[in-house]
Amino acid sequence: MSESESHGQVVRGCIVGTDYLSEIVTHSGVISEIRRVPGETSSSDCWISPGFIDIQVNGWRGKNFNRESVMPEDVLEVVRMLWEYGVTTFLPTVTTESRESLSKSMAALRQAAEESAEVDHACPLIHLEGPYISPQDGPRGAHTLEHVRPPTIEEFGFLQECAGGRIGLVTLAPEQEGAIPFMEELAGKGIVMAIGHSDASPEDIAAAVNAGAKLSTHLGNGSHAKIDRHRNYMWEQLARDELSASLITDGHHLPPAVVKCMVRCKGVERSLLITDAVGLAGLPAGLYSDWDKPVEVTQDGAARLHGTPYLAGAIEPLTRNVQRAVQFAGISLADAINMVTINPARLMGMADRIGSVEVGKDADLVLFDWDNEKYELTVTQTMSQGQWVFPNGDSQ
């Protein structure tokens, strides 16, 4: 519930993690005051959360950041569409492609942020996932083999220039030739380094952590179907307290028991939820033959290469991942919300302005209903920089 107060906003509800009603006052795009409503206890009719953060979004509803044809206006459309699901901050993610294609995607993302204050706020950084990954079937996932290559500082510098310095997260395989010194140099510049799409040995993972790696990207995915039961890259990353882990908990990418074990192993404070959404996300069920490869979007929220059991990317919104994390891992709603707010904010060095409901932070807020019996989260309103953007804004 919200109302105006001297040209600002007053948002009333129960802040996730508390059991009483609060009023949050916003002015000039930031939270200016938080006050408890005297004598009122929460009925949980309206929950308030910081704006959700997703550090891995490849596209949404037909828009694909990895296509050479991507335009700045496409990025703005995705920003507005994701407001419907409470996402106020996300990292546009560009995956393995040719140097020319990557440069065009980076230039479009840069231009979008320079031309739109909405994009600049919602997309403060870019996630480069590949092309410096394992060429092996399994770890490579759906990335194109012909464009997989070892990392070079020269190429990264070129892409960073195209991106206007906005690349802030890089996922790569530490076993690739030259990867460890590459990671050391980028980590020294404040770029978050992540292990993913990798067939790394325990020694490779140890070297990556020593080089500054902080994250395991979509742990449990982008890997072989079968691995050694003891000596493998899954256990090694789970055992490393220096590494946080991002998880796709949509019900398709990881079985419930795996989600539960991973969250218990990493701890809530080192677990992040991501969508890894591809451009087919948000589209109705059906066969999409005009995509890179024929892909079937199913009624139960999966996207599979047509005629195969293989997933062709994630298509569920972040709200679904929050729901399934509570259901699968047996954690509280507050813990799951932390996984899409303060945890990614801290990882990416943005916790000074987003990720929690505190005075002085950006007024990025989500109001939602929660059904604890059905594990259903329904966003009712989204605020970005003190302005209501869903359902009263331009979201589609």
Image: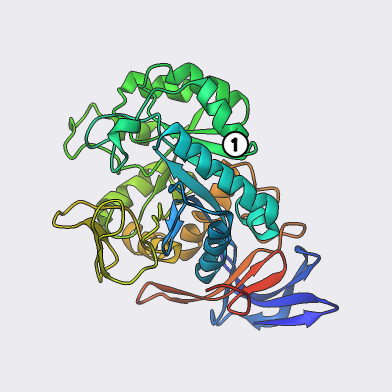
- Give the amino acid type for the residue marked by disc 1 in the picture: Cys
Residue 28, image x and y in percent? 81, 65
Using residue 165 as the reference point, say whether residue 52 is left or right of it. left
Report if residue 124 is visible in the image. no
* Residue at x-position 45% and y-position 39%: 101
So how many labels did they put on this image? 1
- Residue with the most extreme right position: 6
Please provide percent x and percent y for residue 10.
74, 77
| Picture quarter with the N terminus | bottom right
Residue that label 1 marks? 162
Q: Quadrant of residue 151?
A: top left
Q: Nearer the viewer, residue 306 or 239?
A: 306
At 49% across and 52% down in the image, what residue appears? 70
Quarter residue 40 falls in: bottom right
- Residue 339, image x, y percentages: 49, 54
Is the residue marked by circle 1 packed among few (<14), some (14-19), or many (20+) residues within 10 Å?
A: many
Position of residue 140 measured from the top left corner of the image (x, y, whole percent) = 29, 36
Most extreme residue toward the left is 307
Q: Is residue 371 left or right of residue 158?
A: left
Q: Report whether residue 176 is seen.
A: yes
Residue at point 66%, 60% (across, down): 118
Say left or right for 304 vs 52: left
Q: Quadrant of the rendered structure where residue 218 is?
A: top left
Rendering colour mode: rainbow
Tell me: residue 185, above or below residue 54: above
Residue at 59% in and 33% down:
160
Q: What secondary structure is marked by label 1?
A: helix
